[in-house]
Image (spheres, helix red, strand yellow):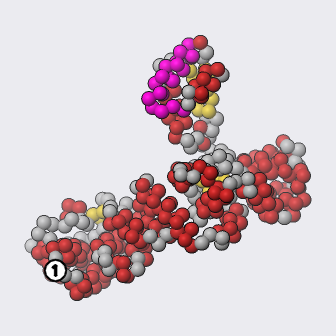
Amino acid sequence: MQFARTEKQKGFPFEADDKKIFIENFTDLLRSFPLLIVYHDFNQIINNSVRTFLTDLLEIPTECLNLLLLHNDEKRDSFSNVYYLSRLEEWDYYKQHSLNLSEEQLNTIRTYSDGWLAAVKKIAIHLPINLNSLLNNPEDTILYYFDLFYLNECTEQQQELIVQLSLMKEFPLELIRYLTIKNKDAMLENWLCNPFIRYNLNTAHFYFAEILYPHLKKKQILMSNRQKEHFYLSVANWYEECCNKIMAINYYRKAHAYNKMIPVIQQWTYPDSAEMANCYIEAINEIPANILDKHPLLHIIRCYMLNTLYRYEDTYKLMKTFCSQYFQKKGTSAEDSALLGEAYLLLGNTSIAMCLDTGESLSYYKQAAELLPQGSSLIRKKTSLFADIPVIRLPAPEPGFF
């Protein structure tokens, strides 16, 4: 214990430079006091610094230290989360606390507890005093306790952030830290360990208990559209920093921050899923026409995404219109010519995929070749294969076609 107090006074957990000294001191301690460290529900540890610390301990060359990591793999519903109790487990827990509930009473309570252990514990504490209230008017009683014991005890900044987070389906701990890095009064890390917060182990995200969303939605009415957009913009910025393009684009859309969203789209990569392709298409479709006209490359990117979904006819119609109208709006600069060349190249690939007349496809390729003497800058290796997924069907070519 003295060793622990001393290390804590030194500032544990340490920065990387001090870690070596700590390991040396800890190793000396083990020679006199062999240790067995048990981590129950190891799969529940979400703090990366704790996992790094355990990894460092495992690397100590000694037989005087043993780590026992208990991992619960049991899956209930869509979560492998030890804190979710089955119906019988929840019933047994109440019985152990001298609460003999009928099946009907248990079903009423379980509708709101979800079997979440933190919630079950709180219910076991308050149930003897408020049995009739909880069973006869469970929703109002539970929300009363939420406001009294959890929301009202928060700072004004924390309450504001809680309502903002209810605009999201789920939220990671790292995002909360990012949103509160300049405002420690709004930090919610400790607050997340309450019975009204759930944790999705599959996504490593937190979310509110279902009963809270309508309650918090009423509080969202007090938020102005500008406040909501500012929150969405902050979330989008974080996702962009994390290189999560889909989430960044989605939240830039919610914030109507098209000028921030467009550069993310223009740094496009070949989509590895239908979700990503649809995300790009829907985002581009939502951009106002006066803004979209200033970024003609987005028309071509949208059509590439359509091709990954095998929507060749849509691509063909859009690119035909784009090619016929483009020079009416633009000049004949090298940049304009290159962009038109990319459009003709896409038309050629799409017409082949649609099994149209090979002469038509060849005419598009010839126009593309004239406008792109250095080749395409969009199509990898001059082929429209996206992440190894073929997006065009090549018919049997006529002799001499290639």
Q: For the C terminus, give its image quadrant.
A: bottom left
Residue 215 in view in this figure: yes
Residue type at the position of mark 1: Thr
Query: Which secondary structure, mark 1?
Result: loop
Residue at (15% x, 66% y) in the render: 375
Q: Looking at this view, is 270 or 4 the one in front?
A: 4
Q: Name the residue under label 1.
A: 332
Q: For the N terminus, give its image quadrant.
A: top right
Image position, residue 218 (x, y; %): 69, 70
Q: Looking at this view, is 291 or 184 the one in front?
A: 184
State left or right for residue 397 relative to residue 114: left
Q: In this picture, which residue range is highlighted in magenta?
A: 12-31
State left or right for residue 332 relative to residue 216: left
Residue 24 lies in the magenta-colored region: yes
Seen in the picture, residue 247 relative to 399 is either above or below; the reply is above
Residue at (54% x, 64% y) in the render: 231
Report the magenta stretch's main SS.
helix
Image position, residue 14 (x, y; %): 51, 31
Q: Return the residue found at the far left.
A: 400
Image position, residue 328 (x, y; %): 22, 87
Circle count: 1
State left or right for residue 59 relative to residue 270: right
Residue at (78% x, 49% y) in the render: 122
Residue 15 lies in the magenta-colored region: yes
Seen in the picture, residue 46 relative to 368 is either above or below; the reply is above
Decide: few, some or many residues near mark 1? Use Cα within 10 Å; few <14, some 14-19, many ≥20.
Answer: few
